[in-house]
Amino acid sequence: MSSVDRSSRPLSRRQVLAGGGGLAALAVLTACNPRTSAAAPGSTAAAPGAPVRSATLTPQVTRLDLGGPVVDTWAFGDSLPGPLLRGTTGDVLRVEVANQLSTGTTVHWHGLPVPNDMDGVPDVTQPEIEPGASFTYEFTLTEPGTHWYHSHVGVQRDRGLYGPLIIDDPQEPGGYDVDWVIVLDDWIDGTGTTPEQVLAGFESGGNAAALTSPRLGGTAGDVAYPYYLLNGRVPGAPVSFTAKAGQKARIRLINAGGDTTFRVALGGHQMTVTQTDGYPVVPVTVDTLLISMGERYDVEVTLADGVFPLVAAAEGKTGQALGIVRTGSGATPAADAHPSELDGKLLAYADLHAAAGAELPQRNPDVSYDLVLEGSMKPYRWTINGHAHPDDQPLPVSQGQYVRLRCVNRSTMYHPMHLHGHTVALRASDSDATGPRKDTVIVLPGQTVVTDLLADNPGQWVTHCHNIYHEAVGMMTRLSYQT
Ligand code: C2O
Ligand code: CU
């Protein structure tokens, strides 16, 4: 769909796994039934004979080595990130979640227009999966791209309950020599403080860390995390990604953090952005980009010869996550490596345009809603249109309507706003027909961000801030299909 060079060479499984960067890959997926036909895009019913990809996720208490620091936490099995789930469009994904925690949980499939009862939002789309109980999620993989999954209960996501979900597109021949999945996170659990204690501290009037960034229009976050992780590792013990000089890499970036936007750069390289939130954009080449909580970017890089730091600096905070890209000999970059690209040309939303065929056609909205974002630290309260979920005021829509959502940020902090079950088009103006498709959009303080969507997936769909502490106190409302 995009005009990126998609030359002939198909990506082999071996190449995908080479230098895989420490993810527990593929082993959990078992396919049965040969494909006979693909499901129609957007359809929720599996095509007859569609391959079924089965996996089990086990939320559990576990001890993890982050590459030095050893933490007691909650994760899917004993890997961080959780296992890589990967399939092809048209496949059915069937995931049994066997809850071994002593509290309830759910799993949400961030970025996927699943049937509403598979969306994993407690009390909105399903009851929590009780301790010792299991729930099986099953849906057809319709949207190719870089997505992820995570717990949707309380602040569990700020522990280790997240993992990557990649959907390959058989129509996209590839042309990449290597394909790397990179999950970024901010980490506090098991270091003497749990995320629940962080939240309780805010709710009892505790101070936020004083963190600011002009790139985020003011406050950069409220939590100074002790560690920032790339694929579950601290920068003192980074994972390596290996390839040959001259090869073309597709790098898939996912921000699973709770309260941290990362500024990402690869030393010695520019990055060509080819997708955001799974959808193709007209390729744009930059030195660095900001990726906020819940967002994804796919970038393409032609690799130089040597050893290079892949840095995700915690924007407005002290610290960074690090990975190492190796195509030749050279010294390993230091944990605090700061490639000059981090201060170079920064991707702006205005640089992003939906690739041909990926645009959301323009129409006059049938219905338009403002989502006024407000909040304060004392008392700790974050609201949409003056209400906090579950006392939110749902926004009624009907199937087939063209819906405009205007996020109006009246607070002094940025909010990465996420919508379930749909992918919006970001509109720079009323005549902007080429806005990128996204499901998570940064709204800066004082800014109004306009997005359009087609109401094509009936149900009750939450929209919320992807800052885990804002979300946990109810910075969330619902698009509510009327039947
Ligand atoms: Cu990634 Cu409602 O969340
Ligand atoms: Cu927020």
Image: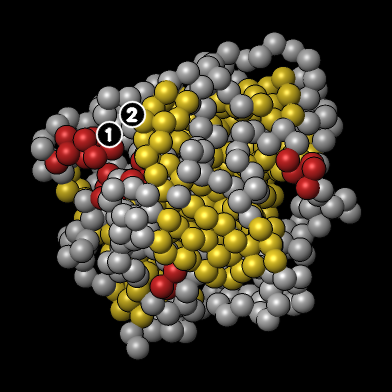
Left or right position of 71 against 429: left
Residue placed farthest to the bottom in the image?
483
Q: Is residue 382 above or below residue 237?
A: below
Instruction: Count the numbered circles shown.
Output: 2
Which colour assignment does the render follow? secondary structure
Image-quadrant location for residue 356: bottom right
Q: Nearer the viewer, residue 454 or 192?
A: 192
389 sits to left or right of 397 = left
Q: SS at mark 1?
A: loop
Q: Quadrant of residue 196?
A: top left
Picture coordinates of residue 347 (x, y %)? 56, 41
Residue 3 falls in image quadrant: bottom right
Q: Quadrant of the N terminus?
A: bottom right
Question: Given the current orientation, which residue lies at the most extreme right position?
Answer: 8
Residue drawn at the location 73% of the way across and 24% of the way down: 326
Using the image as rendered, state which of residue 422 and residue 363 is in the foreground: 422
Under mark 1, the amino acid is Thr
Q: Which residue is mark 1?
A: 194
**Percent x, y of residue 168:** 69, 58
The 10 Å Cα crowd at callout 2, few under 14, some 14 to 19, many 20 or more, is some
Please give left or right for residue 176 compared with residue 196 in the image: right
Residue 30, label in figure? none
What residue sits 66% from the left and 14% below the top?
332
Q: Which residue is mark 2?
A: 190
Q: Nearer the viewer, residue 266 or 215?
A: 266
User: What amino acid type should be assigned to the residue bearing mark 2?
Assistant: Gly
Q: Position of residue 262 (x, y in %)?
A: 47, 35
**Location of the C terminus (image quadrant):** bottom left
Residue 316 visible in image:
no
